[in-house]
């Protein structure tokens, strides 16, 4: 929008007051006129490709690692939920129904004893091997600052505190295009990340 050339208020001799509106009158008059016609650019509709970039396809190794890390996160959230229904929902992408039922029973026993989790394990994946529809994740975790404690007292549940070098081997199976946890075992030999 263009505006007329600004006009200045002239100075009046001392003793004569000029209302502010008198100085602004030319500007107000210019604004009260018809709006200038401005041509705006045409609106464009976003295409599906522009709206969301296509997800990158993960390699089989990346898929296995994603399933493994998703599982470990879901297990912690499932235990902390204190709800059998949430346990089933959180673990269903990673475990079969029978294993989830076992988890619900084990978690329920801990919940009845008023046990809660504390700390976060440090995960260190040191190897991934894939053979056909089976994969193994070798993980060396530091779980020494995590475990279970009694909610009422804060005392550590005996035997629940981890170690600096938990040597875990997890087998995953490719089921219906998704990697699910088959079995997880703790190796008795120390490891280092």
Image (cartoon, grey):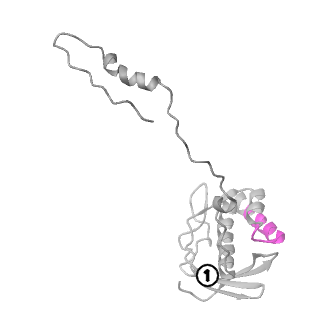
User: Quick one: 70 or 153, which is closer to the camera?
Assistant: 70
Give the x, y percent position of residue 32: 46, 23
- From the image, give the main secondary structure of the stretch colored magenta: helix
| Position of residue 16 in the picture relative to residue 124 (left or right) | left
Please determine whether, in this image, residue 60 is positioned above or below residue 98. Answer: below
| Residue extent of the magenta highlight | 93-108
Give the x, y percent position of residue 91: 74, 66
User: Quick one: 157 or 3, which is closer to the camera?
Assistant: 3
Q: Quadrant of the N terminus?
A: top left
Quarter occupied by residue 40:
top right
Give the x, y percent position of residue 123: 57, 75
Q: Check if residue 100 falls in the magenta segment.
A: yes
| Position of residue 30 in the picture relative to residue 79 (left or right) | left
Please determine whether, in this image, residue 31 is positioned above or below residue 108. Answer: above
Q: Pointer 1: residues within 10 angstroms few (<14), some, or many (20+)?
A: many
Viewer can see residue 84: yes
Quarter occupied by residue 88:
bottom right
Give the x, y percent position of residue 83: 74, 56
Q: Residue at x 55, y 81 (%)?
A: 165
Please determine whether, in this image, residue 129 is positioned above or below residue 69. Answer: below
Quarter occupied by residue 120:
bottom right
Q: Check if residue 18 falls in the magenta segment.
A: no
Viewer can see residue 113: no
User: Quick one: 1 or 105, which is closer to the camera?
Assistant: 1
Q: Residue at x 57, y 56 (%)?
A: 153
| Position of residue 144 in the picture relative to residue 5 (left or right) | right
Furthest-top residue in this view: 15
Which element is circle 1 on?
strand
Q: Which residue is mark 1?
A: 139
């Amino acid at each position: 929008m263009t505006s007329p050339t600004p006009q200045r208020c002239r100075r009046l001799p001392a003793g004569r007051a000029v209302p502010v509106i008198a100085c602004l009158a030319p500007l107000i008059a210019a604004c009260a006129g018809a709006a200038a016609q401005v041509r705006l650019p045409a609106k464009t509709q976003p295409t599906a490709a522009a709206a969301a970039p296509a997800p990158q396809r993960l390699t089989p190794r990346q898929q296995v690692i994603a399933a493994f890390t998703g599982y470990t996160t879901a297990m912690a959230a499932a235990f902390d939920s204190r709800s059998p229904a949430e346990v089933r929902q959180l673990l269903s992408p990673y475990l079969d129904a029978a294993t989830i039922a076992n988890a619900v029973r084990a978690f329920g026993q801990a919940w009845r004893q008023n046990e809660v989790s504390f700390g976060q394990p440090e995960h260190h994946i040191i190897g991934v091997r894939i053979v056909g529809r089976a994969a193994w994740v070798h993980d060396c975790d530091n779980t020494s600052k995590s475990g279970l404690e009694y909610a009422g007292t804060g005392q550590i549940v005996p035997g629940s505190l981890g170690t600096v070098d938990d040597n875990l081997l997890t087998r995953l199976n490719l089921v219906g295009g998704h990697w699910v946890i088959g079995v997880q075992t703790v190796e008795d030999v120390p490891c280092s990340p």
